[in-house]
Image: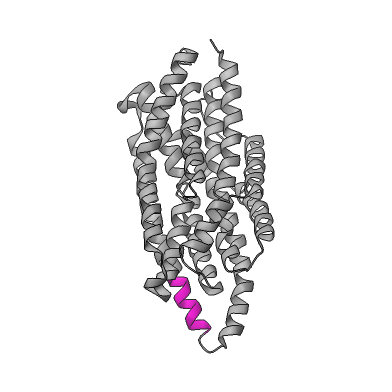
Amino acid sequence: MADGFGILIAAIGLSYVYAFIGGFTDAANAIATAVGTRAFTPTQAVLVGAVFELLGALTGTAVALTIGRGIVSPAYVTQSLVVAALLGAMSWSLITYRLGIPVSETHGLIGAMVGAGLALAGPEHVNWLGVLPILVATVLSPALGVVAGMAVLAVAWNVSSGINRSRAMSRFRVLQRLSSVYMAFSHGRNDAQKPMGVLTLALAVHFGWTDIEVPLWVIVTVAAVAGLGVAAGGWRIIRTLGLRITGLTPDQGFAAETGAATVLQLASQVGIPVSTTHTITAAIVGVGALRRWSAIRWTLVGQIAVSWWLTLPATIALGFAWTVVLGAVTGGR
């Protein structure tokens, strides 16, 4: 039977793997539109994304604390629950990455933690009041992404209306480099904090912490690993977001990134983990539809939407299953 320290080491290791996978598969969130409009070359976009993902992840812990405190009643959290939740979330991320479909890392982790909590402690010990605002925000974030992207694009068109189109696109290409930095920073501030929260939860369970605070070394190391994941690049999803949903021009890319990043900043400020994938994908759809409705590949958008709706039930089931398996192996520790 594995001892408690061994399970802690597994939880720590998996937290870092999850941070890397999150950066790897979610690299597209920060850099896909810049690649699609040729504001950056793929190599430039990956390097910029990695650096500002790291910097964004260092700017706060509000989202991490929500993950660590708000999903399952702390008295019923075990190392097995943490490990099972990570395995469930990572399993789904890798499956969907293989298919080239962008899905929500937030949905995946929340679903897996809920599934693990249901298996270990029952529905009465899942903090539904903590889960509900996260789910509401995750549903609202795509709508806000659409609105924000369209609003920024409308303003951009108004400001540039008297400028030669070729010159305007050249200027927007420069502006999009800045919006890509903003998006990468915002992505790091929200998404990279999720593995920080899970890792801190594992440490709190093992050492019996009554007040969960994210240690500085956790912030720095998880941020660095997430940055490495972005540097590795998730090219399948970059192709889907940057090239396949709709053909993007620099003004559209700038608007989509600026709108989505602003939504992420607002969510991070209040400590709500939202889906960066949903937000930027919706913003891309919004700016594409504002130019021409028929320019959107709606069949692909429909496939992505189905995968979004499948994520929660799939990861709840995976989290539940992994908890049962690990409980048998570890004796429920």
Q: Which quarter of the picture shows residue 48?
A: bottom right
Residue 29 x %, y % = 53, 55
Q: Is residue 208 visible?
A: no
Query: Residue at horizontal 56%, vertical 32%?
Result: 199
Looking at the picture, tell me which residue is in the foreground, 244 or 74: 244
Note whether 177 is above or below 223 in the view shown. below
Q: Is residue 97 visible?
A: yes
Residue 116 x %, y % = 41, 27
Q: Is residue 310 left or right of residue 155?
A: left
Q: Residue furthest top?
A: 1
Looking at the picture, tell me which residue is in the foreground, 126 or 109: 109
Q: Range of the magenta residues?
A: 150-160
Q: Which quarter of the picture shows residue 10?
A: top right
Query: Residue at horizontal 42%, vertical 64%?
Result: 285
Whether the magenta-drawn stretch holds residue 158 is answered as yes
Q: Is residue 113 left or right of residue 160?
A: left
Residue 111 x %, y % = 40, 37
Whether the magenta-drawn stretch holds residue 143 is answered as no
Q: Main secondary structure of the magenta part?
A: helix
Residue 241 x %, y % = 50, 59
Query: Residue at horizontal 35%, vertical 30%?
Result: 126
